[in-house]
Amino acid sequence: MKFGILYNTDYYPEAHGTAAQYYEDILTQVELEEALGFDAVWFGEHHYSGYSFGSPPVIAMAAAARTKRIRLGTGVSLIPLNHPIRLAEEYAMLDVLSGGRLEYGVGRGFLKYSHEVMGINEDENLARYHEGMEVILKAWTANGPFNHNGKFWKLKDYAFFPKPVQQPYPPIYASAVITPESAEWAGRHGFHLSTAFFVPQQGRVRDIINLYRQTLRANGFNPEEREVSGVFQMYCAPTQEQAVREGTQYALNYFKFFGGLDARAAHNSKDFEKHGKGISRSFVAEAKGETNPARQFMIGDPAFCIDQIQWAKEYYGTNYLIFEVAQGGEPHDLVMKSLKLFGEKVLPAFK
């Protein structure tokens, strides 16, 4: 089993202080995570008022400068909202400067407001995602100048620099939570899978994973050579009562924030209507007959967390758990205590 940390954080001035203090606390946590033996730290991308990071490679590079071993990921890089050459350059440079530690998580994004901010037609979201990834892979793997004649981007005799350290390219984790087409696309390309274990529709998530593995086989890839990573909210305390009392309030704060993200601008894209409308609300809504609330969160004492990890390993067939921390205004000192206890009492059971 591999274990990572994901920062999809929501900024609260009263809890976090200045932006400089906020980022310093996160980097201090990353230093502890490396010392405790976590395998990776991932940073989310969003373009909305203090949610995650507008530029994940910047915070990831700061983390790289203060660490030596821990891998650096994205959860996720929003391909449709960016020029793919810019992404290829920034993340290849991160891979080079970190000594080959990049784990590149990619996805489509779901907020209409972010599309409006970036001037992107949401009807083009899926096509931009697929073409953008094509351009990034060309840039990372081409031997010499290459051409691209696509719908959104055109390149002629383009020479890319720098090449990533990891060859042929850094591991790519494609996001798929409850959308079958996303799982099939990830499987056809032989990418690793990134999904979410905190959603209520646990049966649908497991079906997505099974579909992904079936698609891998159908396209000549060995599922045993591909990772399935899944995200939980995590908070660990000495007793179950303390963990629930301290951890649940911040998880609920985050879910309330997360559940209201798409309220600013409603989707009108047919694709989002079919697959993504209200996706944030689905994460907090009750899915009758499809959920076990006790299994949605990694909030508990060490014994509970060990049991939860074993359950997720067996139920989902996952080999890579990624924990969201520091959400909902959770104070830095509580984040550090939770990480330390988890690292000292839970990780050794699986390492």
Image (cartoon, grey):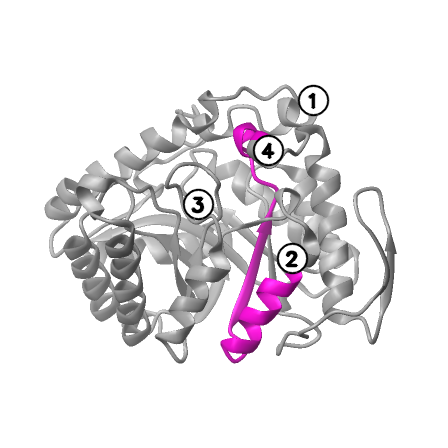
Nearer-N-terminus badge (4/1): 4
User: In the rendered image, which quarter contains the N terminus?
Assistant: bottom left
Q: Disc 1 to disc 2, how far (Cα)?
A: 28 Å
Mark nearer the N terminus (1 vs 3): 3
Residues at marks 4 and 2 touching, judged by CB atoms closer than 8 Å:
no
Question: Which residue bears the numbered disc 1?
Answer: 270
Q: Is residue 98 visible?
A: yes
Decide which of 51, 189 is in the foreground and name it: 51
Give the residue type at disc 2.
Arg
The question of residue 229 being in magenta is answered with no
Magenta stretch in the rendered image: 88-116
Q: Is residue 39 visible?
A: no
Q: Earlier in the sequence, mark 3 or mark 4?
A: 4
Q: Could you tell which of marks 3 and 2 lies nearer the N-terminus?
A: 2
Q: Which mark is residue 197?
A: 3
Q: Nearer the viewer, mark 1 or mark 3?
A: 1
Q: Secondary structure at mark 1?
A: helix
Which residue matches tag 2?
A: 86
Tag 4 residue: 115
Ranked by sequence position, the earlier of labels 1 and 2 is 2
